[in-house]
Amino acid sequence: MRKADKIRSGMLTDCTETLSNVNEQISYFYGIFFDMNTESLAFTNDYSNIYGYISGFDIFVEDTRWNFENVKNILGNDFISLTIMCDPVCQFESMFHFMHMETHYNVSSFEMFLEKLEAGKITNERFQIFGRNQLAYTLGFEETSFENNTAIKAIIEEIDRQFNLVIISEYFEESVIILKNILGTRIGQMTFVPLVVRTNDTKHKLAVKQRLLLEKWLNVDVRLYNTFKRSLERRFTKYVREEARILKLTNNAL
């Protein structure tokens, strides 16, 4: 999104639901909001490229593979970029069930998937655009770099350069407060109701051994997540923590 006194318009499509809602609120507060579906844009088959002349937008929210240069073509050079990460193990387990990936991996359950993974019988072939190291893949990096430590280091450094803020879902309120400070908005403009949140009884409970197995397989995502989680924690001043507490109270009242 552009950093501007007046946000002229917003464009939102499918994205992480709650974060998308927060951005939608900002566009309502500061100007005209345009709700456009993806048919208004032209995407290549791999979902990583946008082409064609598009202008006049101050907020672009899209659940697709990140391409920094193409977003610059939409928003110009002076914009604020943010993304969101959650625990890679939890994300993969959720994605496995939500996308019904049993057929792709030829298993009948998540337990059976873990058994095949431990036995080295799981391939890295993606199910459409979903699969191993989903965070890194969504951020635009190819699977050929997933076993190369030098390339992984470069991936992390590139993401750090391209994004003003990497939100960590486990620190969502604190992240929203930091976003508020970047944009110069008020707490009341950042309130939210969590959307599309699974209840605990629908989550697969992992043993320590199973979690370690998945962390090893999701090697790039784990390094990405841990790096940016630590980076976010370093931004938690006492004021950020206090305002996050106020935001939680405001959300509860809402």
Image (cartoon, helix red, strand yellow):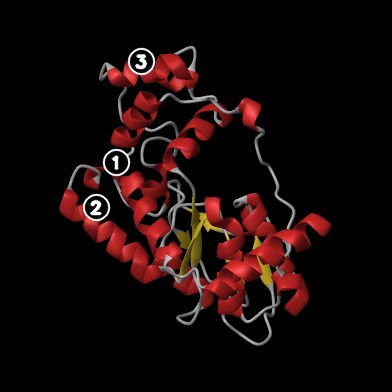
- Residue at the bottom extreme? 5
Q: Is residue 113 left or right of residue 167?
A: left
Q: Choose top left, top right, bottom left or bottom right for residue 172.
A: bottom right
Q: Position of residue 128 (x, y in %)?
A: 45, 35
Instruction: Confirm whether residue 31 shows in the render.
Output: no
Q: Which residue is tagged 3?
A: 115
Q: Is residue 175 visible?
A: yes
Secondary structure, mark 1, is helix
Circle 3: element type:
helix
Q: Residue furthest right?
A: 253
Do the residues under discs 1 and 2 have CB atoms within 8 angstroms? Answer: yes
Residue, disc 1: 219
Residue 152's label in the rendered image is: 2
Instruction: Between label 3 and label 2, give the one nearer the viewer.
Output: 3
Q: Is residue 30 above or below residue 120?
A: below
Q: Which residue is drawn at 44% across and 64% down?
A: 232
- Identified by mark 1, the residue type is Asn
Residues under labels 3 and 2: Cα distance?
27 Å
> Which quarter of the figure has residue 9?
bottom right
